[in-house]
Amino acid sequence: MIPMNHEERIPMKYIKTFLTKALMLCVSVFSVVVLLALLTTIISFSFYSVILAAAVSALIYMYLKLPSNTDQ
């Protein structure tokens, strides 16, 4: 390995620091995007389950409230 003088090593150190910070920023942004996607999925599943429960309960209510022929 060829030894470099002080002036040649400093820019490599700055590039390494810059790339490390850029990588950390990219990972942070990716983590936030994944977290938001998971939260929206959870919210949509809970909304769909509430709608399904309301529909099933409405069907049960309508079925039980139908006039039966045995009442006459």
Image (cartoon, rainbow, N blue to C red):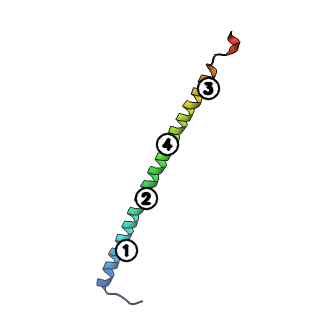
Q: CA distance from mark 4 to mark 2?
A: 21 Å
**Mark 3 belongs to which amino acid?**
Ile
How dense is the environment of label 4, judged by Cα within 10 Å: few (below 14), some, or many (20 and up)? few
Residue lying at 69% horizontally and 14% vertically, measured from the top left: 69
Which residue in the structure is indicated by mark 3?
A: 60
How dense is the environment of label 2, judged by Cα within 10 Å: few (below 14), some, or many (20 and up)? few
Front-most of residues 60 and 29: 60
Residue lying at 53% horizontally and 39% vertically, measured from the top left: 48
Measured as percent of width and height from the top left, residue 59 is found at 60, 27
**Mark 2 belongs to which amino acid?**
Phe
Between circles 2 and 1, the one closer to the viewer is 2
Q: Secondary structure at mark 4?
A: helix
The residue lying furthest to the bottom in this view is 2
Q: Earlier in the sequence, mark 3 or mark 1?
A: 1
Which residue in the structure is indicated by mark 1?
A: 16
Measured as percent of width and height from the top left, residue 72 is found at 68, 9
**Mark 4 belongs to which amino acid?**
Ser
Between circles 1 and 4, the one closer to the viewer is 4
- Give left or right: position of 59 versus 31: right
Measured as percent of width and height from the top left, residue 66 is found at 62, 19
Q: Which mark is residue 30?
A: 2
Quadrant housing the N terminus:
bottom left
Q: Secondary structure at mark 2?
A: helix
The residue lying furthest to the top in this view is 72
Total label count? 4
Q: Secondary structure at mark 1?
A: helix
Which residue in the structure is indicated by mark 4?
A: 44
Q: CA distance from mark 4 to mark 3?
A: 24 Å
Front-most of residues 28 and 60: 60
Q: Secondary structure at mark 3?
A: helix
